[in-house]
Amino acid sequence: MATVTFTSSEAFMADDETGRACERAEVEIVGYIEGTYDMLRHEDQRGSLEFATFVDGAWELLDGRRFSDWAVRFD
């Protein structure tokens, strides 16, 4: 199992016009994690699933929460 941690800088939070910027979130992933320039996905028993996309200069989770573009950590 891996934990993917998304965080946002104070500047990102202050400049948010969408109302969806979040300071921190952790996503638990079982299986491999694959990253491209515009997407993070993992594989489980249902196949390959996206869990974050890079939209308009920020990482966005499926529920709409947005995070700074540089602030992704894998543990």
Image (cartoon, rainbow, N blue to C red):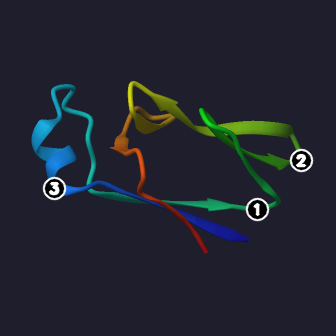
Q: Which of the two marks, 1 or 3, is nearer to us in this view?
A: 3
Q: Which residue is mark 3?
A: 10
Q: Position of residue 14 (x, y in %)?
A: 10, 44
Sequence-wise, the earlier of marks 1 and 2 is 1
User: Residue 75: image x %, image y %?
Assistant: 61, 75
Tell me which amino acid carries mark 3: Glu
Q: Is residue 12 above or below residue 24?
A: above
> Which residue is at 41% across, 45% downward?
69
Q: Is residue 38 above or below residue 45?
A: above
Number of residues whose C-alpha sits closer than 10 Å to that of mark 2, classed few (under 14), some (14–19) or many (20 or more):
few
Specify whether 33 is left or right of 12: right
Mark whose residue sits in front, 3 or 2: 3
| Mark 1 residue type | Val
Which residue is denoted by mark 2 in the rendering?
45
Residue at 17% x, 34% y: name it: 16
Checking the image for residue 30, the label placed there is 1
Whether tag 1 and tag 2 are in contact, CB under 8 A, the answer is no
Secondary element type, mark 3:
helix
Looking at the image, which residue sits at the far bottom? Answer: 75
Specify the amino acid type for callout 2.
Gln
